[in-house]
Amino acid sequence: MTGNSFGKTFTLTTFGESHGGAIGGIIDGCPAGIEIDLEFIQAELDRRKPGQSKLTTQRKESDEVQFLSGIFEGKSIGTPIGFIIPNTNTKSKDYSHLEKAFRPSHADFTFSEKFGIRDYRGGGRSSARETACRVVGGAIAKLLLAHHKIQINAFVKSISSISLDKNYQEIDFLLIESNEVRCPDKEVAELMIKAIENAKKAGDSLGGIISCVIQNVPVGLGEPVFDKLHADLAKAMISINAVKGFEIGSGFEGTKLKGSEHNDEFYKDSSGKISTKTNNSGGVQGGISNGEDIFFNVAFKPTATIMKSQKSVDKEGNEIELEGKGRHDPCVLPRAVPIVEAMSALVIADHLLRNKTSKI
Amino acid sequence: MTGNSFGKTFTLTTFGESHGGAIGGIIDGCPAGIEIDLEFIQAELDRRKPGQSKLTTQRKESDEVQFLSGIFEGKSIGTPIGFIIPNTNTKSKDYSHLEKAFRPSHADFTFSEKFGIRDYRGGGRSSARETACRVVGGAIAKLLLAHHKIQINAFVKSISSISLDKNYQEIDFLLIESNEVRCPDKEVAELMIKAIENAKKAGDSLGGIISCVIQNVPVGLGEPVFDKLHADLAKAMISINAVKGFEIGSGFEGTKLKGSEHNDEFYKDSSGKISTKTNNSGGVQGGISNGEDIFFNVAFKPTATIMKSQKSVDKEGNEIELEGKGRHDPCVLPRAVPIVEAMSALVIADHLLRNKTSKI
Amino acid sequence: MTGNSFGKTFTLTTFGESHGGAIGGIIDGCPAGIEIDLEFIQAELDRRKPGQSKLTTQRKESDEVQFLSGIFEGKSIGTPIGFIIPNTNTKSKDYSHLEKAFRPSHADFTFSEKFGIRDYRGGGRSSARETACRVVGGAIAKLLLAHHKIQINAFVKSISSISLDKNYQEIDFLLIESNEVRCPDKEVAELMIKAIENAKKAGDSLGGIISCVIQNVPVGLGEPVFDKLHADLAKAMISINAVKGFEIGSGFEGTKLKGSEHNDEFYKDSSGKISTKTNNSGGVQGGISNGEDIFFNVAFKPTATIMKSQKSVDKEGNEIELEGKGRHDPCVLPRAVPIVEAMSALVIADHLLRNKTSKI
Amino acid sequence: MTGNSFGKTFTLTTFGESHGGAIGGIIDGCPAGIEIDLEFIQAELDRRKPGQSKLTTQRKESDEVQFLSGIFEGKSIGTPIGFIIPNTNTKSKDYSHLEKAFRPSHADFTFSEKFGIRDYRGGGRSSARETACRVVGGAIAKLLLAHHKIQINAFVKSISSISLDKNYQEIDFLLIESNEVRCPDKEVAELMIKAIENAKKAGDSLGGIISCVIQNVPVGLGEPVFDKLHADLAKAMISINAVKGFEIGSGFEGTKLKGSEHNDEFYKDSSGKISTKTNNSGGVQGGISNGEDIFFNVAFKPTATIMKSQKSVDKEGNEIELEGKGRHDPCVLPRAVPIVEAMSALVIADHLLRNKTSKI
């Protein structure tokens, strides 16, 4: 009930504060027989880890995952996959000044009120460090999806007002990892990098939009009413730290179209497969995947942690002045790309398994 | 697993096809002792019902809810509240031509593939008629929320390109029900009505955006990681038929702000309450309500059913021409306002109860 | 959270008080494509209904189930199956004297304390009338299990001290329905019937044991740790009104055996199938079905409602004298046989579906 | 769906094979503010650990729990409590001969069939080592229950045919830990110890019955229909390795009583509290605790691992002869006492929290 589990059949449950002994989790419901490629999983984690480029926090965390169960002779065995990622670089002293402070747009105040007690070191449970566990779960999910040739590609679409104005169909996904901002367009990426560097220098932070495309999803995933495929994707995305918005297919702009413009006409393609000519639906109709590409946008607010001085109050309601110190990300989007993919993979894996019982 | 239940502690499970014997549901987890105001519940249903104005489908459905259990001497008694809404006006003949057809941007194709069999009459389970049950569940939730003085107001913010460009703080919610489009601004409402009438004449349909504001929510609702309050709101909204997007607080536009502009500074107000000066967070920080107003936007695509002829394929993959017939809504937004409110009420009621165990 | 749902993939959620408008439920997760044999379902209900013989309460309830959704052209369509059973013969006046009284070994006191309010008419939600909905759910589950040739047979093994001392292997299940007590042995059945008639004359009630045998269950159902197949069967059985005990395989008596006597030796039978020579395990090993017959016993206490005068207290704690009146079952076991089968069917159906994802 | 979680509000999810890197789990839903007494938790684990006396396996496992999250400055903070217990003494070589063998009445065969692959070392996931995690979860639950003065005492009631024939009311619970068999009667305990020693010498094993008494449970815990308090206790108990039966209150013997003998008459005691004169109900009526002591029996079969040679088959169906080797418990009951208590604590803690929302 406390919301530390995600998924109904393929389930990830996580634990961990940023400055406790370790973070970790349990992946439950992974079918037996999946080859567990440990290098791939670590590589996914490395895409998320801090300190990977000059754009991200200079905090170094090795983020090495240790699997403790559920894998035998290189394969999943159907039992829960337990894992931990030790917290190795926890400078608790950095945070002592925050014991009583409520940082603006952080979770300090709400945690304090909700639980009456909080681990104030580094954000505790509300630290984005928690998302490393999502990446581990998502990596296992991706290994399951690979059996079905399902592919997931996320990329940075905009940073502040700098936007990649292309349809995803025009994009070469292989370019995503070619630069440190994970925008698959050299020129736009350079502008973004410059903007982030400027924000960093100013002690400020930037937000932006990540796009995600899921391909080769079979027809039939998702449930008709509350657990629509895109409803679960929306929840998955909005549950990521700093996310404020989600839109699928035609999204907010599509509200300005007429029905006759928006409807996706069916036709039989040359291979005999029923397809749609357009894809305003974003690959989901009536909450169920229709075999077309699933694509959606995720809005990230600018990071709450900034290096500028800010006014706030403390636990007792006294006015305080917060000095920016410690290590922070001037823009989380480059590191959030693998998180968006991981959460997508968890949703699709879950619905893939759930769909095994739709027909006799 | 088939996604017909919503909520974890305050739960709504629904059933029903548009042309079966009845639709209905079970509200489980409602605490005992709530006064059940049947007139209020019926009034909520009436706000959603078809045929209420010239803007909506002329299909008349009385949508009278019958409660079968869980209420005794006017109060909830802690047992499940079962209810049905009979399907009274089901012209099944209208739909016989759709037995094999896959209507564009409807769920005909995906249901067929997923289940191998479908009730093709009036959309069956994928019909928006299902949302009447959400309104019943939401009305019970609102009665629970009324004990905590929590208020929910949704309204139509835009229809196609016609938009009410005011902050919600400038709006008088009492005006929402003053016109048939449920836009709380007389002049904008008139433009919207005209646009819908024009679309109707053209046999076409329009989309738009509904805004929702939730007030007096206590600090502490929502769970830190996956079940963030706004993640559950997002899922709730995206699960409504025709919804393509969700944004809370600063939303997509907020991605263009800097952290120093976006952060909501805390202060102690004159009553000693800790508040924020701005509310870019939209009332939720770290997934937990912070006591400020919660507000969000929901994007609705234009209705898929139009009266224009469209090309498509049938079950066997044959090309077909679909003639627009039957009764339809040229724009669902006016009727969707109470649905947005109902889903909001379900989420808040659920988290209100879940939060009873956060502290010893 | 209020425990009105059973099962994780194949789920039954019920509602209803004995004297409300109707009882009913929602069966969710039934795969599409199952032929729904309505006569069979009604026949199952008739096995449970009151007034079927002189051994049971003379209260007449027609218990006619009405399906409202989820079935189209005679088949399940993968959407939730909603149903109601109207409460037709509700003599509310019979119960007015119980508004404040706490009947011994009934749920009057505990409901009052838990909820602060209760529907005192006929036991309300705690009435065994609720089990009619379990029979409907179980009947649908049986139709699913029939696709896998799984068979479930329950029978009365003992009434008070009169016991059928045979292994189930020696029993002809076809005799179960040959007498009104549902004991598949003519002579023992006659003794049981006499005992029940005597108890009835004396205004008293009897308990006993129901045995259940499930055959043709494939190897592999059940989950290793908490959701062991027999753990879920135990919960299913103990959740039936008046049940006080459950044992599987060798059960309580088996605690007196040595390991060398109790262990079930594996061998390859003539068909090449791996089987066990004995079946002290009762068809479940490590929580997972092993392909042998599953068999277990369920202990029912004597009915709490008796026609003798009893002392008790009322809501205010005043001493009262309760006169036996109204209609009651001197022994519930004959009518509980289909309930035990129904709950068994729900457990097996649920695990059958859950097991679809155990391997890649 | 794979059954590695227990509880709905206070939840324990576990992972781990006996010979993997570690076993462990996540306790989710523990309210913030509970003092976490680490010594108490370790003491509970020590009651379960192997090698604690000559009656148990001589395998030495230190079973030291490491908490990784959810605790700060000695208190629970409302976030998930992650923990691991490293597997330190894993002689994997001992089990290499079991790679293909199906040991009688073990889970080797069923795991192989269900998952297609299994960790054959030491039973893997089906090893009773998994129950150490239940003890950790139960210990945290006990700390929560201590706030409500709820007490749980389990003890060995019988070993094979040697039985402690006293009502629990006549027993001094302080004697439970006074001998290595955990039977609170010196003379009966000595007989039990002798019987276990004899079985050990003979390379055989014994079963028996554990009784459990839960005191000071408030009125109102448990849900009326499927999640009856004793139904959840039954599931909890039957889910423990080697358990074959459960009975509460009057249990199987009570089926021989008449209703007039079995009913528990209410009265107002001298303090004004409504109580029952007898307690055949075992503290639960209509699935809900009534404030009386909850007591039940749990039947354990004799340990499947014996040191005698046994016939069986291997994966390919070849007949094999299994020699008894390795380390084993001739009788698990003494070590199972804390497990029975732990599972009881988990059930009561869960329902205590669930009951917070029964009334407005």
Image: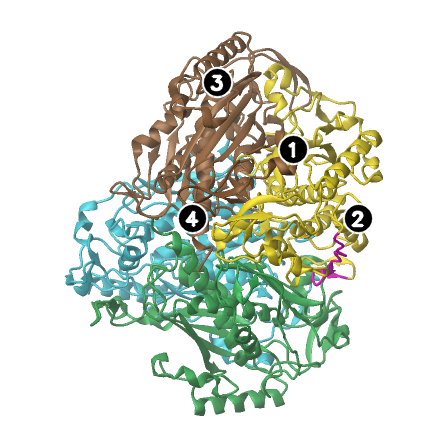
Chain colours: A yellow, B brown, C cyan, D green
Q: Amino acid at mark 2?
A: Gln
Instruction: Find disc 3 in the rendering and name its residue.
Output: B93
The answer as to whether the residues below labels 4 and 2 share one chain is: no
Any magenta on residue A122?
no
Q: Quadrant of residue D227?
A: bottom left
CA separation, marks 2 and 1?
A: 23 Å
| Mark 3 in CB contact with mark 4 (< 8 angstroms) | no
| Residue B289 position in % (x across, y down) | 49, 43
The answer as to whether the residues below labels 2 and 1 share one chain is: no
C328 displayed left or right of B60 = left
Pointer 1 indicates a residue of which chain?
A: B
Q: Amino acid at mark 1?
A: Thr
Q: Amino acid at mark 4?
A: Leu
Structural crowding at the residue carrying mark 2, measured as other residues with C-alpha within 10 Å and reported as few (<14), some (14–19) or many (≥20): some
Q: Is residue A28 visible?
A: yes
Instruction: Find disc 1 in the rendering and name its residue.
Output: B255
CA separation, marks 3 and 2?
A: 63 Å
Instruction: Find disc 4 in the rendering and name its residue.
Output: B353
Mark found first going from the N terminus, 1 or 4: 1
Q: Quadrant of residue B217?
A: top left
Pointer 3 indicates a residue of which chain?
A: B
The answer as to whether the residues below labels 1 and 4 share one chain is: yes
Structural crowding at the residue carrying mark 3, measured as other residues with C-alpha within 10 Å and reported as few (<14), some (14–19) or many (≥20): few
| Residue C316 position in % (x across, y down) | 18, 59
| Mark 3 in CB contact with mark 2 (< 8 angstroms) | no
Mark found first going from the N terminus, 3 or 4: 3
| Mark 1 in CB contact with mark 4 (< 8 angstroms) | no
Q: Which residue shows up at 35% across the image and 49% down it?
A: C130
Query: Is residue D14 depicted above or below C19 in this figure?
Result: below
Instruction: Find disc 2 in the rendering and name its residue.
Output: A52
| Residue C67 position in % (x across, y down) | 42, 36
What type of secondary structure mainly makes up the magenta span? loop
